[in-house]
Image (tube, rainbow, N blue to C red):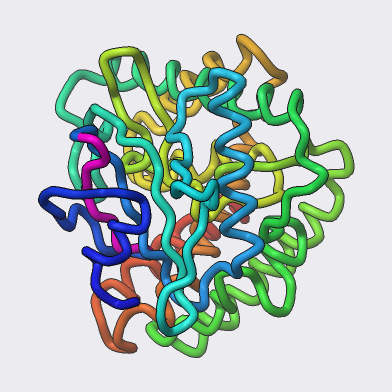
């Protein structure tokens, strides 16, 4: 089964099919009984079947608990996941009627106060995610680990970031030093809040809708440090002169429902996100691409800041 039309038909979809995103997954807008839904063709080799199915189970439970996220849509036989040719999988989730709060490489179109007000709401959204997750069943969920080894071990989940091909020999040596220092620091954070996290709460994955903010795209979710969700949230804003104000706004929102990580801890997890992204890009871009260098420079910049 290779044709998108045939895959969509397995869910009873009909009508026009429109490709709306092609990043880790190819995402299409299709219709079931004249209502829009999102058909996802999952990237081969990234998540295993059990992991994808766990994502769908988790988000279904979140939606049942009234957390604002897409809900999986089952096929007529009740199945949530379809294996297609080549060992790839397809799933369908409910459509989110809204717009992302921003996009990478785009400046915020508003005042600093408006930006902070928005991110206060995002902080509250992530606290709601963590609260609801802690209140539902998760012991049957199989997802990757954003733990000490998954972030800073010999083979991190998103790749050996210190081997980014755009790093010079001296930069690579520095990144290894920074990784080792971060490993010791994270190992010492014995009381850090840990559990299921979204792990990719960037602007494109947070939608503004008529009913409020909605979190989408749980493809990178896993078991990890809750502070990492807040660090990932800040990763597209690390050069802002008012970064600390934005972080404090996130902390204020998050702190309404849960104890918020400190400013220093969020900066630390922001650096870890920079590390992870510098590894993520390695197999996805040519060795000499400007994108490789941009991700490496972010990791270097954040390392210098944290170490100093």
Q: To which quarter of the image does residue 181 belong?
A: bottom right
Q: Percent from the top left, x then y, of residue 93? A: 40, 43
**Residue 270 seen:** no
Q: Name the main secondary structure of what is drawn in magenta.
A: strand
23 or 239: which is nearer to us? 23
Which region of the structure is painted magenta? 25-33
Image quarter (top left, top right, bottom left or bottom right) of the N terminus: bottom left
Q: Percent from the top left, x then y, of residue 150? A: 70, 65
Answer left or right for 204 relative to 307. left
283 or 308: which is nearer to us? 283
Q: To which quarter of the image does residue 264 belong?
A: top right
| Residue under the image location 51 percent in, 50 percent down | 77
Q: Is residue 103 above or below residue 53?
A: above
Q: Is residue 293 above or below residue 306?
A: below
18 or 7: which is nearer to us? 7
Answer left or right for 290 relative to 134. left
Answer left or right for 265 relative to 52. right
| Residue under the image location 70 percent in, 66 percent down | 152
Q: How many labels does the image show?
A: 0
Answer left or right for 47 relative to 97. right
Q: Percent from the top left, x then y, of residue 106? A: 18, 44
**Residue 129 seen:** yes
| Residue under the image location 40 percent in, 27 percent down | 214
231 or 132: which is nearer to us? 132
Residue at the extreme top: 256
Was residue 91 drawn as part of the magenta stretch in this picture? Answer: no
| Residue under the image location 34 percent in, 19 percent down | 118
Residue at the extreme left: 16
Residue at the extreme front: 77
């Amino acid at each position: 089964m290779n044709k998108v039309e045939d895959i969509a038909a397995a869910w009873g979809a009909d009508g026009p099919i429109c490709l709306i995103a092609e990043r880790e997954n190819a995402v299409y807008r299709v219709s079931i009984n004249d209502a829009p839904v999102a058909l996802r063709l999952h990237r081969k080799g990234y998540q295993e079947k059990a992991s994808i199915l766990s994502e769908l189970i988790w988000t279904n439970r979140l939606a049942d608990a009234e957390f604002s996220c897409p809900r999986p849509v089952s096929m007529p036989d009740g199945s949530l996941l379809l294996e297609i040719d080549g060992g790839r999988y397809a799933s369908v989730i409910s459509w989110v009627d809204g717009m992302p709060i921003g996009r990478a490489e785009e400046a915020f179109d508003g005042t600093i106060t408006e930006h902070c007000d928005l991110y206060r709401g995002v902080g509250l959204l992530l606290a709601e995610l963590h609260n609801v997750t802690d209140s539902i069943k998760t012991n049957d969920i199989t997802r990757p680990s954003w733990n000490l080894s998954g972030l800073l071990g010999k083979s991190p989940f998103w790749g050996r970031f210190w081997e980014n091909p755009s790093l010079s020999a001296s930069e690579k040596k520095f990144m290894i030093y920074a990784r080792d220092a971060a490993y010791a620091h994270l190992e010492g954070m014995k009381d850090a809040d840990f559990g299921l996290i979204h792990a990719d709460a960037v602007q494109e994955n947070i939608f503004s809708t008529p009913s409020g903010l909605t979190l989408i795209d749980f493809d990178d979710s896993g078991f990890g440090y809750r502070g990492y969700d807040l660090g990932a949230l800040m990763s597209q804003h690390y050069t802002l002169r008012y970064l600390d104000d934005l972080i404090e706004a996130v902390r204020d929102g998050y702190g309404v429902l849960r104890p918020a990580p400190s400013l220093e801890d969020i900066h630390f997890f922001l650096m870890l996100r920079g590390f992870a992204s510098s590894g993520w890009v390695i197999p996805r871009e040519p060795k000499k691409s400007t994108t490789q260098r941009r991700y490496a420079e972010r990791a270097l910049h954040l390392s210098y800041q944290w170490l100093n």
